[in-house]
Image (cartoon, coloured by chain):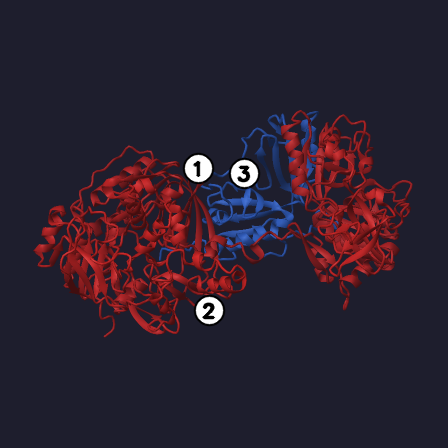
Chain colours: A red, B blue
Amino acid sequence: MAQPFRLSRGGRIDRSRPVRFTFNGRTVEGFHGDSVASALLANGIHLVGRSFKYHRPRGILSHGPDEPSALLSVDRGPGRIDPNNRASVVEARDGLKTLSQNHWPSLEHDIGAVNDLLSPVFVAGFYYKTFMWPRKFWDKVYEPFIRAAAGLGKAPSVPDPDRYANRHAHCDVLVVGAGPAGLSAALAAARTGKRVILADEGPEPGGALLHDVTAEIDGRPAAEWLSATLAELDSRETVILLPRTTAFGYYNHNHVALAERITDHLPNPGTAPRERLWQVRAEQVVLAGGSHERPLVFADNDRPGILLAESVRVFINRYGVAPGRRIVFATSGASAYAAALDAKAAGLHVTLVDLRTESECGPELARLKATGAEVLTGHTVIGAKGTKRVTGLIVAPVDRAGRCGARRLLPCDCVGMSGGWTPAVHLFSQSRGKLAYDETIDAFRPGTSVQAERSAGASRGTYDLAGCLQEGFAAGAAAARSEERRNFTASPTLTGFRPVRAMPTDVDPGKVRAFVDFQNDVTAKDITLAVREGFHSIEHVKRYTTTGMATDQGKTSNMNALGIVAGQLDKTLPGVGTTTFRPPYTPVTFGALVGPARHALFDPIRTTPIHEWAEEHGALFENVALWRRAWYFPKSGEDLHEAVARECEAVRKGVGIFDASTLGKIEVVGPDAAEFMNRIYINPWLKLDVGRCRYGLMLKEDGYILDDGVVARIAPDCFHVTTTTGGAPRVLAHMEDYLQTEWPDLRVFLTSTTEQWAVIALQGPKAREVIAPLVDGIDLSPEAFPHMAMRQGTICGVPTRLFRVSFTGELGFEINVPSDHARAVWEAVWKAGQAHGITPYGTETMHVLRAEKGYIIIGQETDGTVTPDDVGLSGMIAKAKKDFVGKRSLARPDVVASGRKQLVGLVTDDPKVVLDEGAQIVDDPGQPIPMRMLGHVTSSYWSPNCGRSIAMALVADGRARQGRSLHVTTPEGFARVTVVDPVFFDPKGERIHA
Amino acid sequence: MLEALYRTARALPLGRAPASDPACSGVQITPAGAEARFALRIRDAGASAAGLPLDGPINSVRGDDRRWIARLGPDEWLIGSDEAEADQLPAAIAADLGERAHAIVDVSHRNVGIDVSGPLAAAVLNAGCPLDLGDAAFPAGSATRTLFGKAEIVLIRHDGATPRYRVECWRSFATYVHGLLAEASLGVGETARR
C-alpha cells in the first residue's frame, strides 16, 4: 500500500492531487502540499542521510528551516542539481529527483560509517592535533586528504540554466514571518493604509496556526481567523504578501534582503525566474520569525525516527502523516504535551516521559493523563535503541541531584523530544541589536534595538497565542505610527519548560554519543573536552569543536552548547555570552545573489560607434576599463606580431586609421576656465590661444602623476579636455572635487563629453591628403593649421572639431565628430584612404608607435608614485605659477632627493630579445642574492620601424646612467642592456610637422 | 552626400534593438528616436530661459515629450528637445541668460533615451534602480540621476494614466541598460504565490 503512514484524514494537503518524485531512485508518492520530508515519512522512510563526520544514519529531525540532518541533493532537471537541501522545506512535486548524501556505496551500507567506530580518535580538535607533524606532510598528504573529506554533497558541475531576478523595494512596514504575530502585525499596519510587505519562508502563510488544529481565536477556529486575515490583507493594494520568501539578511539602514523562491515548486516553470532577490528598504521592521525547539541531549539522540516533538505534531496535523505508530514523547516542558494530545487524538500509541516532577507540571499533565496515555514524570532519557531507526527509548527515574533509578525500555518507532524553545533572534542580532538573557525563558531575547525595528511573538520569547496576536498587533500598529490596539482572546497555549543541557544519565557521560550539533556531528563530550582543554570563550569553543558552524548555524544546538559550556565553567549563561548571528539566516543560492548580472549583463561592455566596423574587419579586441577596444586587425594567417609589424609600418610610411573614441573628454566652460586649468594642470594655460592645443599633465595632491591628455582651447572661456581612456571618470571626479570644495569661487562648469564625440585618429604622412577632399571650412595647409592646433568646420557635412595632434610622431589628425555620425565619417575616410593604402590599426600598434617616440602611457610608465621629473617632464611645469595641485609635494625631501627612479630607454645587446614588461633591473648580475634592484621595465616591444626591440624603464638615477650597461631579468637568466634616451625614432621630431 | 542627411541620419546605438514589449509582460521598452539634449549649468538661474522653466525644484521635470527640462541639481539641468530645435535652442537659452556665467553643452549624441511604460514599469526599473519609485516618492514630474544596475542613468517620470518613464543613459551603456530592462521585464509579474 502506498503511503502506509498517511493518516486517513486531516492535514492541509490536497488528497485529490497526488504527486510523485523519487528518493534514491525509488518512487515516492505524496500529495500536493507535502514537503519532501512529510512525503518520505508518509511512506515510512526515516533513514535519509549519513552524518557529516561519523557517517551515522540520520533521519528527519524537524519540519522547518532548522533541519540539520535531512540534507538531500535535489535534481530538478539538467543543470539544476543542488546539494544540501533540507527535506523539510523542499516542496514535493512531480518530477523531482532527490538523493541522500555523504555515503558510499549506498545509504544503507556506507563504508564511511567506520568513522563512527573510530570516533574515539576523531575528538574535538582532531585536525589540529593530528595534522601538525611532520610539517612537510601538510601540502601533499594532509591538506588534500582533509579537502577530500570535507564538504557535504556534490557541487554542481555545469552552468546554472535558471534565470534569477532582482528587485529593490521600499515600504513603510516590513513584517518578517506570517505566523500569528506577523499576521497580526501586518493587519494592524495595513489598516493605516501604509505600504506593508509581509514575507514568510513557508509556501503558505500562517506559521504555527497551520498545525494548531484545536486553537480558537476570538471564539472561532484559528483556521477561520487565518483565512479572514489573509483575505483582508489581500484586499489591500498597499500590501505585498510574499510566501516562499526568506528574509535572510538584515543590513544597515533597515536594508533587509529577502530570497523569493518562485518556481522550485512548479513542475513547469516556463520562463519565470527561479528566484528573486528582494532588497527591501523599510521605514520600520517587525520581526516575527518565531522560535526553534531544542532537542534533548542523550545517548544516540540522533537515531532516525527521533524528531522534535513539535515537528511530530506538524507532521500529524498539517501533513496528515504519522511519523510512527508508537510514539514516545520525551520532554522537559509543557509544549510536548500538545503534540502528545494531538498524536493521541490521531489514534497513535503515546507515552510521555517528562524530566520535570509532577509538581513542576501545569494543567497539561492532567489533560494528557485524561486521554489514558502513560506519563512518566521525573524521568530522564538514558539513551535510544536502534541504529537505522529508533526501536526504543531507555528511561529511568531521576532525582534532582541527577541520581538515576531503575532503567526501563520503552519500545517505540518514533520519539518526539523537546528541550524547550529558543527565540529566533537571528535577524535581530544581524541588525546589531543587543541580546538580553532572560532567565524566565532560559534564552536570549531581543534587548535594545539599534535600528527602526521591533520583535513580536515567539521571536521575543512570547509563546502563548493570545500574547503573540496582541504583541504582533501592537508592534504592527506602532511601526505604522497608529494608536490602535486590540485585545485578542485565544485558547491557552501550553508553555514553560525546565532548562536542561545534557540529560542526566547513569553511565559515564564521557563515553556516550549525545549529539548537540547534529549537522556538524558535535557531541556533548566534545564540548566538555574543549572546555577542559582551556577553550573558555564561547567563540573559541565554537571554532574548536565546530559547533554551530554548519549551514544550519546551530539553530537547534546553540543553547544546549552554551548551557554545557556554562555548566562546565560554573558560570551563568550570560556570563558565557553568545556567538553572534551572521547572514544568511538560511542558505541562499548564488543565483539569487548574482541575479541577472551574468553573461552580457555581468558588466556593461562599452563599445564605440566604430565597434561593428572593426568587428566586420576582423579586429581582435582588448578590455580597457569597461571599454572594448580594437587591439589589432590581423589579415588571414597573421599573428599579433605580424599584424602589428604591418600596421606600424603602414602608419610611418602611408596612413593608418585608429578609433580613439574611448578617450575621456571634458568640456570645461566658464569665465574662470583658464584659471581653473592653470590650477589643475602643472603647465600654463592662461596664454594658450584659441584654436591651439597643449599636452597637459595633472598631479594628485601628493605630487604624483594622475593623468595626461591633449587639451584644445575652443573659446576664451571653453576648453576641450581629453583624458586617458581608463582615467576619464577619476579625472572628472578629481576636477569636480577641487571645484566644489577648494575653489567654489571659480565660475567654471564641467560636462563629460566622452560619448558626445567619437574620435577618428588619422596618422601618417598621407593623412592630410586623405581628409583634404572631405573637409570644408578648414585650411589644412601646415602654415594655416600647424601641429597642436584645433579647427572647427565640417567633414562630410558633419560638424567637427579637427585636432592636428599626434601620438605616433607622424603627421596626424584626430577627427572629433558627434558619435551618431562617426561610422559614416569613418567609412568616408576609409574610402578616401584606399588610394593611399589606408590601414586600420589597434591599440597594440598605437602602443608601439608611441614607445618608439618615448611618449609615456599613464599606468604603464606611471604607477601612482612617479613625478613629472621622474619621467623627464619637469620642463612642463610653469615656474611662474603660484600654485597648482601637487606643487607643494614636488618640494618634499624624498621627491627632490637624488636616486629616484627615472625614465630611460633600454636597448638589448641582442636586438632580437624583447624584454618582459615588469622585469627587474640590476647593475651586476654577479652580486650576491638578494640583489639590489635598480628598477623595472615599463614598456617593451619589437619595433618594426627601428628593426629591433625597444624598451622603456624606470631606473634609479637612470638619466645619469646613459650609455652604461645594466642587466634585466629574463625567464632564462639575464639580458644585458644599454641605457639610452627613450626616443628611439625620429629623435628630432621633424616628421610630426610635415 | 552625407550633408543632406545630417541631423536625420543619426546612427542610434539601439537603432536595431527591437521595440516594445519583449516579454509580453505589459511593459513597453522602446528606444527613443534621435533627439537633441543639452547639459545646462548655471548658478543664478532665474525663472526661465527660452521658455524653459528654471525655477522648478531639484529632481523635477517640466515640459512635454517634445521639449523637457529636468533639474538634476542646484545648478544643473538636462534639456531634451526635438532634433529640429537643436540648432536654435542653445543660442536662444544663451541669449536669455545674457551675461550670467553658464555652460550649455550639446550632449545629444552622448545620451540615449529608452522609454519604459506600463503598469509594472516601476517594478522593471526597480530590478536595477534602488530608489523608491512609489507614487508618493517619485510622482509624475520627477527626474533624478540614479543607477540602473551598474550603469548611471537619469530617470524621468512623465505624466500619464499608466506609468511612463524615460531612462537616459550614456551611449556606450545603452546596450547594457536596454538588455537589463528586457531581462527584468521577463517574468516581472511572476511571484512565488501560486
Q: Which numbered circle lies on residue B136?
A: 1
- Above or below A331: residue A618: below
Vertical comparison of A689 with A321: above or below: above
Q: Are marks 2 and 1 in contact (CB under 8 Å)?
A: no
The x, y position of residue A915, in whole percent, is 78, 56
What's under tag 1, amino acid-wise? Ala
Question: Which residue lies under the disc numbered 2?
Answer: A78
Amino acid type, mark 3: Ala
Q: Chain of mark 1?
A: B
Task: Say whether marks 1 and 3 touch (CB < 8 Å).
Answer: no
Q: Residues within 10 Å of mark 2 (few under 14, many from 20)?
A: few
Q: Which residue is mark 3?
A: B143
Between the C-alphas of marks 3 and 2, the distance is 45 Å
Q: Is residue B90 left or right of residue B17?
A: right
The chain letter under disc 2 is A
Q: Measure the alpha-carbon separation of dots 2 and 1.
A: 45 Å
Q: Amino acid at mark 2?
A: Pro
- The chain letter under disc 3 is B
